[in-house]
Amino acid sequence: MACPQAGGLHSFAFAVLLLSGCYITLFGPRNEYLSFIVLTPSITALALVMIARADADYRGWLLILAAVGLGFVWHMDVNSALKPAIVLAIYLWLTWLMAVPTRWREIVEGDETLRAKASEPAVARAATGNR
């Protein structure tokens, strides 16, 4: 299974949830209002993960602002232009972020988890005496 080797089921599942929510929102037929029910909580969850790791991370606060903007009901002209633009910006950013899996895992799993996983082979080699 490639997923655990690439970083874990938690980060993979979170990536699938976010990207599929963005995709459904942008390209799904006749679901202008219902798709935001899927997307807004997942964006908020990502923002809270980012803010919990570093409250000065402006990306988390921008995601909160985007989730609030997506949650409001605006005039139909504003809804039809602003909401897809917000979702497209988030979708492109997430795609760029996930193009290199370590960038995504750093946000979802944190630096400490990645460092611990990277140091495991070195610790195992040191314990067995092989270098």
Image (spheres, rainbow, N blue to C red):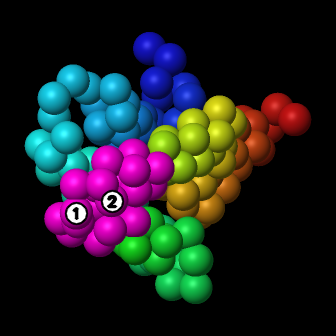
Please give the residue where the numbered disc 2 appears in the rendered image.
78
Residue type at tag 1? His
Q: Is residue 123 visible?
A: no
Of the pair 99 and 12, the residue shown nearer to us:
99
Outermost residue to the right: 131
Q: Is residue 82 above or below residue 22?
A: below
Residue 102 percent coordinates (x, y): 65, 43
Q: Are marks 2 and 1 in contact (CB under 8 Å)?
A: yes
Of the pair 62 and 1, the residue shown nearer to us:
62
Q: CA distance from mark 2 to mark 1?
A: 5 Å
Q: Is residue 96 above or below residue 110?
A: above
> Is 48 positioned to the left or the right of 30 in the image?
right
Please give the residue where the numbered disc 1 appears in the rendered image.
75
Q: Is residue 48 above or below residue 91?
A: below
Is residue 86 part of the magenta span, yes or no? yes
Of the pair 97 and 102, the residue shown nearer to us:
97
Quadrant housing residue 14: top left
Highlighted magenta segment, given as a residue range: 66-87
Outermost residue to the front: 77
Residue 73 percent coordinates (x, y): 18, 65
Residue at horizontal 87%, vertical 35%? 131
Quadrant housing residue 31: top left
Rendered image: mark on residue 1: none
Residue at horizontal 16%, vertical 29%? 30
Q: Is residue 88 visible?
A: yes
> Is 54 positioned to the left or the right of 78 in the image?
right
Residue at horizontal 21%, vertical 24%? 29
Residue at horizontal 30%, vertical 54%? 77
Residue 59 percent coordinates (x, y): 55, 69
Residue 122 percent coordinates (x, y): 75, 43
